[in-house]
């Protein structure tokens, strides 16, 4: 255990999440690890998110040591660039990312920071659960990270990330982990190569670089990230323009991912794994394309062919989603875990 709690910077990109924002902020403020720098990046929200954050900043009870900071984007840049803004402003030894509609268990940062101090890990991964607006909470029975204790070093780090081939998003989301700020700063020039407005698969863009440059990775159990699942949540929702933007983001990120592997001299080792990762995402987006009818389906199919360089739509099978098929409901709300 560390003798003094290291400063940990918590980056919260905020965009139109007023309904959940207070719950998110409260979960961070009430951490047992209280040496926190909380950086909220308001990405031009339409509602009153900025006012909510300002209220927390002015309240001596929620902000006794002026640890909450608000950065306002002058234009909407997307969650990817909001996170980069946060990284550039962060002063902590460690950095964490939380989406503004999510929350964390009370002991979350203490457990992760102690593991980082104990092992010297560049990155520490926590368990997560899915929380729904009706209050129900579930976890995936086949979550491969929950089922093992990780202590990865050297080539083992990128091996673990690449060999799973995108089969479980717990590996490549950024919000269930803490990172050494030194690692984030090392990754920053790579992140900045993407200059466009990016939302979909921005986690993959971050994570492929994090896992490539990290030298040591560990995980913990018993500290939980609550990932909010919204009713009717969809990447397409019958809206072709939204589908086109999201699918284009995915294609851009996959090209970025490949370019990183090639330029870092790791394509020969991981090219086949990357190919399987990409194939799985083409399957997901082929499935999404099939949500459209008649003329829009034809447009969606043509878009998939063009973006991913394939001759037709791929078929998503039950085996592709096998890790997500078995879930267990947690009967208590875990609010004080």
Image (tube, grey):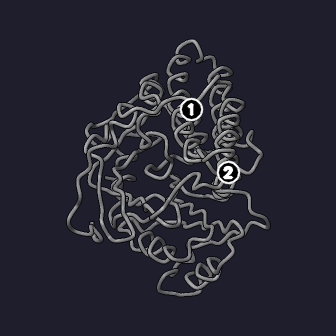
Disc nearest the viewer among 1 and 2: 2
* Other residues around mark 2 within 10 Å, as few (<14) / some (14–19) / many (≥20): some
Q: Quadrant of the C terminus?
A: bottom left
| 153 vs 311, nearest the viewer | 311
Element type where label 2 sits in the image: helix
Secondary structure of the residue carrying tag 1 is helix
- Residue 89 on image: x %, y %: 67, 59
How many numbered callouts? 2
Q: Residue at x 52, y 46 (%)?
A: 180
Residue 218 figure quarter = top left
Q: Is residue 47 left or right of residue 204?
A: right
Which residue bears the numbered disc 1? 282
Q: Is residue 85 above or below residue 125?
A: below
The residue nearer to you, when weighing 5 against 274, is 274
Image-quadrant location for residue 187: top right
The residue to which callout 2 is attached is 240
Q: Position of residue 28 (x, y in %)?
A: 44, 69
Residue in front for this viewpoint, 291 or 19: 291
Q: Relative to 129, is 214 above or below?
A: above
Which of the 4 image quarters holds residue 248? top right
**Residue 247 % position (x, y):** 65, 42
């Amino acid at each position: 255990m560390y003798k003094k709690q290291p400063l940990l910077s918590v980056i919260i990109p905020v965009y139109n999440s007023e309904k959940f924002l207070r719950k998110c902020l409260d979960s961070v403020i009430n951490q047992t690890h209280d040496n926190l720098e909380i950086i909220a990046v308001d990405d031009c929200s339409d509602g009153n998110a900025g006012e909510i954050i300002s209220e927390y900043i002015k309240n001596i009870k929620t902000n006794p040591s002026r640890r909450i900071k608000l950065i306002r984007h002058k234009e909407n840049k997307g969650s990817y660039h909001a996170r980069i803004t946060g990284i550039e402003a962060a002063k902590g030894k460690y950095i964490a990312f939380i989406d503004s509609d999510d929350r964390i268990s009370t002991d979350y940062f203490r457990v992760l920071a102690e593991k980082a101090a104990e092992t010297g890990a560049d990155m520490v991964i926590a368990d997560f659960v899915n929380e729904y607006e009706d209050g129900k909470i579930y976890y995936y029975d086949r979550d491969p990270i929950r089922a093992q204790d990780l202590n990865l070093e050297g080539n083992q780090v990128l091996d673990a990330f690449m060999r799973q081939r995108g089969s479980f998003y717990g590996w490549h989301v950024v919000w269930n982990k803490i990172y050494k700020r030194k690692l984030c700063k090392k990754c920053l020039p790579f992140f900045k190569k993407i200059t466009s407005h990016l939302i979909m698969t921005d986690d993959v863009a971050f994570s492929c670089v994090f896992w490539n440059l990290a030298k040591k990775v560990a995980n913990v159990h018993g500290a939980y990230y609550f990932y909010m699942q919204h009713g009717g949540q969809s990447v397409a929702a019958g809206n072709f323009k939204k589908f086109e933007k999201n699918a284009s983001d995915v294609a851009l990120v996959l090209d970025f991912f490949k370019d990183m592997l090639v330029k870092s001299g790791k394509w020969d080792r991981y090219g086949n794994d990357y190919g399987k990762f990409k194939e799985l995402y083409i399957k997901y987006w082929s499935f999404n394309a099939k949500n459209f009818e008649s003329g829009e389906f034809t447009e969606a199919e043509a878009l998939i062919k063009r973006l991913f360089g394939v001759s037709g739509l791929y078929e998503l099978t039950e085996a592709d989603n096998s890790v997500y098929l078995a879930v267990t409901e947690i009967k208590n709300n875990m609010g004080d875990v």
